[in-house]
Amino acid sequence: MNLRTIRSAILSILDANNTTTSSSDISASLQTRVQKVIAGHPKRPVGLDEYPVVFVSLSGKTESAPFLGNVATRDMAVTWTVHCLTCLSDSATSAENECITLADNVEKCLRNYIDLSGTVDYSNLEDTEYTLEDADSTYVHTARIGLLTKLWSRT
């Protein structure tokens, strides 16, 4: 399985669910709808008009090839980080609440696509970490959601 295909599936799912008609709308209850869903890491500069924004980046991959009887199998676990960024000038608390809401929405969406639309055999949300950065009278909150994807194949 091509890692770009998995990343593309994650991006497509999040992007397709950034609409008010989706039951898993990633922008539900946010002050401003998610402006972009991007492949990459949030160290890339983002303009103030691009918040809230979601990045999807590859974190790691492990593979094993055990034998089950006479059948060789190949197991691959790929970890991803879904970065949810919000930026508000009101207060740190408002920015944090906005980030929590965005992360909750993204987690709900991904739980509804456990096989990422048939791209993987299994996916699971592992953990979510929150951070705050304040600069120039704005508060940027980031939630980093760990997403584990698994693929099994017989060779």
Image (cartoon, rainbow, N blue to C red):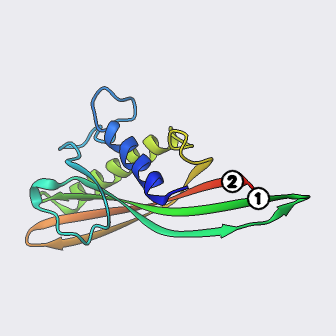
Number of other residues with Cα within 10 Å of mark 2, as a class: few under 14, some 14 to 19, many 20 or more: some
Circles 2, 1 touching at the beta carbon (< 8 Å): yes
Q: Residues within 10 Å of mark 1 (few under 14, many from 20)?
A: some
Query: Looking at this rendering, what residue extends furthest in the front direction?
Result: 155
- Horizontally, residue 137 falls left or right of residue 127, namely left
Q: Which residue is mark 2?
A: 152
Could you say which is closer to the camera, residue 78 or residue 125?
Answer: 78
Q: Nearer the viewer, residue 150 or 17?
A: 150
Amino acid type assigned to the residue bearing label 2 in the image: Trp
Q: Nearer the viewer, residue 126 or 2?
A: 2
Q: Position of residue 76 (x, y in %)?
A: 63, 62
Please determine whether, in this image, residue 113 is positioned above or below residue 134: above
Residue labelled with disc 1:
73
Indicate the position of residue 136 as horizontal and vertical percent values.
8, 72
Residue at image location 39% in from the left, 47% down from the top: 106
Query: Is 80 placed above or below 123 here?
Result: below
* Three-letter code for the amino acid on which mark 1 is drawn: Thr
In terms of image quadrants, where is residue 42?
bottom left
